[in-house]
Image (spheres, rainbow, N blue to C red):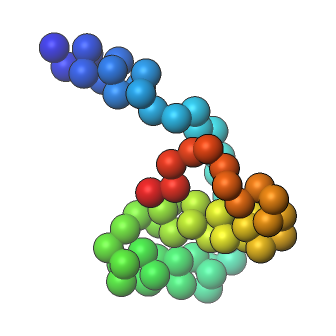
Amino acid sequence: MKAATREKRVENSPPAVRTSISFPREAYQTLELIAKEKKVSMAWVVREAVDQYIDSKWPLLANRNYDRS
């Protein structure tokens, strides 16, 4: 049953790519603080920042067809 639930979740998930990023220590600490204050993961904070960057640099790409939540 557990495997079926996991497979269903994977099927319904939007495609994603995993990456590894290094930050200067001070920037990392700031990201941790933001995540803690917003009660979200650091990954969420970074994805949100990337979305905002893309929206500001390439407004025509602002209406992407993936879930930002």
Residue drawn at x 61%, y 85% is 26
Res. 69 visible in picture: yes
Whether residue 9 is situated above or below residue 54 in the rendered picture:
above
In the image, residue 33 lies at what x, y percent?
Answer: 44, 83
In the image, residue 52 lies at what x, y percent?
Answer: 66, 71
The quadrant in which residue 13 appears is top left
Q: Quadrant of the N terminus?
A: top left
In the image, residue 31 lies at what x, y percent?
Answer: 53, 77
Front residue of 43/49: it is 49
Q: Is residue 18 left or right of residue 38?
A: right
Q: Quadrant of the C terminus?
A: bottom left
The quadrant in which residue 36 appears is bottom left
Front residue of 68/60: it is 60
In the image, residue 54 lies at what x, y percent?
Answer: 75, 64
Front residue of 36/50: it is 50
Res. 18 visible in picture: no
